[in-house]
Image (spheres, grey):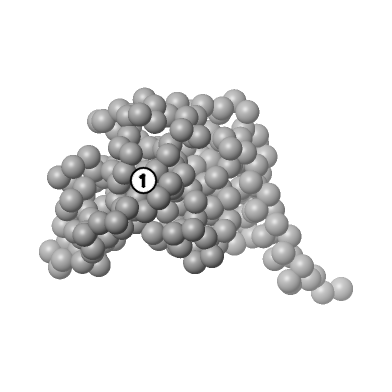
Amino acid sequence: MSLNQTYSDPDALPASFPIFPLAKALLLPRGQLPLNIFEPRYLAMIDDALKDNRIIGMIQPNPDAAFGLFPVGCAGRITQLAETGDGRYLVTLTGIARFRIIEEIEVLTPYRQARGDFSAFAVDFSPRAGEDLVDRDGLLRTLRSFAETNDLQLDWESIHEAPNEALVNALSMMSPFGAKEKQALLEAKDLKGRADVLVAMTEFELARGKNAHPTLQ
C-alpha cells in the first residue's frame, strides 16, 4: 500500500515517536498491520498520534534486553482508523522503515516513547529493492508444502500476482512463528535475506512435524 505522505530517507522521519510493544506483532516496510486498540493508554497514543504525524513504532517486548525491548522495531503510519462504538479503535498501520532503539524518553504520557535511529535501514525507503534476488520459486514451493501439510486454503491467484516484496513481507507478517523468529525476520538484512530466513524456518517446522508424527511401518 502506498502512503499519501512520502518518506524518502531516514531524515524524513521523526527522531522520537510513541512505541507500542506487542509480542509476535511484526510490521515491515509497506506491510499493513491491523490493530484492535482498547487499552486506555493506547487509545491515548492513537489520539495523540493523529494530532501529530501519525507515526507509531511497533516493537516486541524482551525482558532480557535493554529497555525490556528487542533492539529493532518498525515505524508505521496510521492509514486507516475506525471507531467501533464500544470504546475501541480498529487501526491499520502501514510500515515505513525499521529503526534501532537508542533510548527511551521520560514522558508524562501513559504510553511509552523512544528515540530511534533509522540510518542502518536505508534500504527500507526504496520500494521493491532487491526483488530480483529473491528465490520466488523456492518460496512458493515451501509455502505450498506448508499449506498442504496444515490443510490451509490460500488464494493462489493473488499470491502468484503479488510482487516479491509484498509476497515476502506479507508471508513474514502472517507467519505463525514465535517472538524470536519474528524478530529474525524483522532484522534480516534485506528482502532476499528475509525470504531465505522464512523458507528455512518453514522447512524446519515441516521437518519437525514429520519427526513428531512418524509414519507407521
Residue at x 46% of width, y 44% of height: 100
Residue at x 25% of width, y 67% of height: 39
Q: Which residue is mark 1?
A: 115
- The amino acid beneath tag 1 is Arg
- Estimate the x, y position of residue 196 in percent, counting from the top left: 65, 42
| Residue 165 in view in this figure | no
Query: Tag count in the figure?
Result: 1
| Residue 98 in view in this figure | yes
Residue at x 42% of width, y 29% of height: 125
- Estimate the x, y position of residue 204 in percent, counting from the top left: 70, 57
Quadrant in which the N terminus is drawn: top left
Which residue ends up furthest to the front in the rendered image?
Answer: 106
Quadrant in which the C terminus is drawn: bottom right
State the residue in front, 217 or 28: 28
Left-right relation of 147 to 46: right
Crowding at mark 1 (Cα within 10 Å: few <14, some 14-19, many 20+) = some
Which residue ends up furthest to the right in the rendered image?
Answer: 217
- Label 1, secondary structure: give it: strand
- Estimate the x, y position of residue 6 in percent, counting from the top left: 30, 28
